[in-house]
Image (cartoon, rainbow, N blue to C red):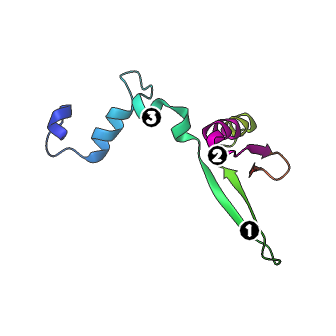
């Protein structure tokens, strides 16, 4: 496989993957260039004493603008399922409805 991309057989996987991720000007290309693949969240699940479950997403991206965009994008991606996501500035979570 390495030879197909111009690398020697003794190349490391990191050489192949990092050079396929960016162009000559260090701009992300291909799969890596699409923002939706780098919008990251952690799922938080809380089980209450009454047995009910509350859940939300903890955004990994730290700016409010990016977090709001993540909520908008994820709402669009999950529209076929009737799911809506909103950013709750007070808690810092993306709420799932």
What residue is drawn where x is 69% and y is 43%? Answer: 62
Which badge, 3 or 1, is on the more N-terminal residue? 3
First-in-chain label (2 vs 3):
3
Q: Which residue is mark 1?
A: 46
**Which picture quadrant has residue 77?**
top right
Q: Are marks 2 and 3 in contact (CB under 8 Å)?
A: no
* Main SS, magenta residues: helix
Q: Residue 25 or 88: which is nearer the viewer?
A: 88
Q: Residues within 10 Å of mark 1 (few under 14, many from 20)?
A: few
Outermost residue on the bottom side: it is 49
Q: Are marks 2 and 1 in contact (CB under 8 Å)?
A: no
Mark closer to the observer (3, 1)? 1
**Label 3, label 1: how many angstroms apart (C-alpha)?**
33 Å
Q: Is residue 75 magenta?
A: yes
> Percent position (x, y) of residue 42?
62, 55
Q: CA distance from mark 2 to mark 3?
A: 26 Å
- Rendered image quadrant of residue 15: top left
Q: Circle 3 sits in a helix, a strand or a loop, which is it? A: helix
Residue 56 is labelled as none
Q: Nearer the viewer, mark 2 or mark 3?
A: 2
Q: Which residues are magenta?
A: 70-87
Q: Position of residue 24 (x, y in %)?
A: 35, 22
Sequence-wise, the earlier of marks 2 and 1 is: 1
Which residue is identified by label 2?
81
Q: Is residue 74 magenta?
A: yes
Above or below for 46 versus 32:
below
On residue 32, the disc is 3
């Amino acid at each position: 496989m390495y030879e197909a991309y111009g690398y020697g057989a003794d190349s490391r996987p990191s050489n192949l993957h990092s050079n396929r991720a960016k162009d000559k000007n260090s701009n992300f290309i291909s799969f890596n260039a699409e923002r939706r693949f780098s919008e990251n969240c952690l799922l938080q699940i809380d089980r209450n004493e009454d047995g009910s479950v509350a859940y939300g997403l903890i955004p990994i991206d730290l700016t409010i603008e990016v977090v709001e965009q993540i909520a908008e994008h994820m709402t669009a991606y999950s529209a076929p399922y009737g799911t809506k996501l909103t950013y709750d500035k007070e808690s810092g979570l993306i709420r799932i409805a």
